[in-house]
Amino acid sequence: MSKITVAIDGYSSCGKSTLAKALAQKLNYNYIDTGAMYRAVTIYCLRNNIIKDSVVDLPKLMDSLKDIDVSFVYNTTTKTSEVFLNGEHVEREIRSMEVANNVSAVSSIKAVREKMVLLQREMGKNKGVIMDGRDIGSHVFPYAELKIFMTADTAVRTQRRLDELTSKGERHSFEDVRRNLEKRDHDDTTRKENPLVQAEDAIILDNTDINREEQLNFVLKLINDLLLTKDEFNKPAARH
Ligand code: DC
């Protein structure tokens, strides 16, 4: 059966990565979390005093870009690809509030985006990939066979994010988390370089009131229908 590219974009903490991971496991596709890539670059910037309170030292960052290597390695226990920064596993550290508070500033820089987009296109060039982010359907893979645009009520998203942080031992107020989400949504949708936009041909998935299984089944059906049409179309014509 042929393989396709699935682009999943949407607002922060909409459950994009949860859905993308589940799809990748079901279909045996690669999962690429592009937000994790920008977060890994942010860790590098924080550690090397390139960013402080969301203010980026641009000349220093431009100088350091060549030294920043972001990659993914498949973890057979968690059954998903995990992100590495210069060979160091940073999957846990990328989810901290400190990274969340600074990542929008880093991801708005053109040179950072260009470097990440090149890597993303390379990783997805053979199809069979589920990639989630903000600009996947609109910019990274504009010809992706399936584009999903995810959204959900802000309060629901805040609670999900708060639960995730709490489970990792970080304590924050509901209001702090909500502010961070709203700020990132605002920064992501208004930045100059490849902002978060819904691609014209994307299918909207609002998961405010639907559970994970329902979301998974909804998208799996879309993919199966697409694959059936694609394989039917590619069949050699019957000989008479
Ligand atoms: O999906 P996430 O919350 O882990 O993403 C972290 C940040 O990275 C988010 O605030 C916006 C940015 N991002 C981006 O600009 N483009 C992408 N393709 C993915 C994420």
Image (cartoon, rainbow, N blue to C red):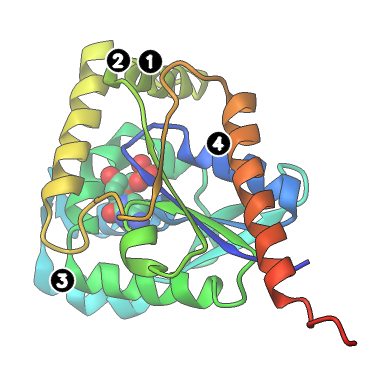
Q: Is residue 128 visible?
A: yes
Q: Do the residues bearing badges 1 and 3 touch, measured as CB atoms within 8 Å? A: no
Which of the two discs, 2 and 3, labels the residue nearer the N terminus?
3
CA gap, disc 1 and disc 3? 37 Å
Amino acid at pointer 1: Gln
Q: Secondary structure at mark 1?
A: helix
Relative to 161, residue 58 above or below: below
Between disc 2 and disc 1, the foreground one is 2
**Amino acid at the residue labelled 2:** Ala
Instruction: Pick whichever of labels 1 and 4 is earlier in the sequence.
Output: 4
Q: Are marks 2 and 1 in contact (CB under 8 Å)?
A: yes
Q: Is residue 38 visible?
A: no
Q: Which residue is mark 3?
A: 60
Looking at the image, which residue is at 26% across and 69% down? 112
Disc 1: which residue: 159
Q: Nearer the viewer, residue 35 or 189?
A: 189
What residue is at 20 percent from the left and 55 percent from the top? 195
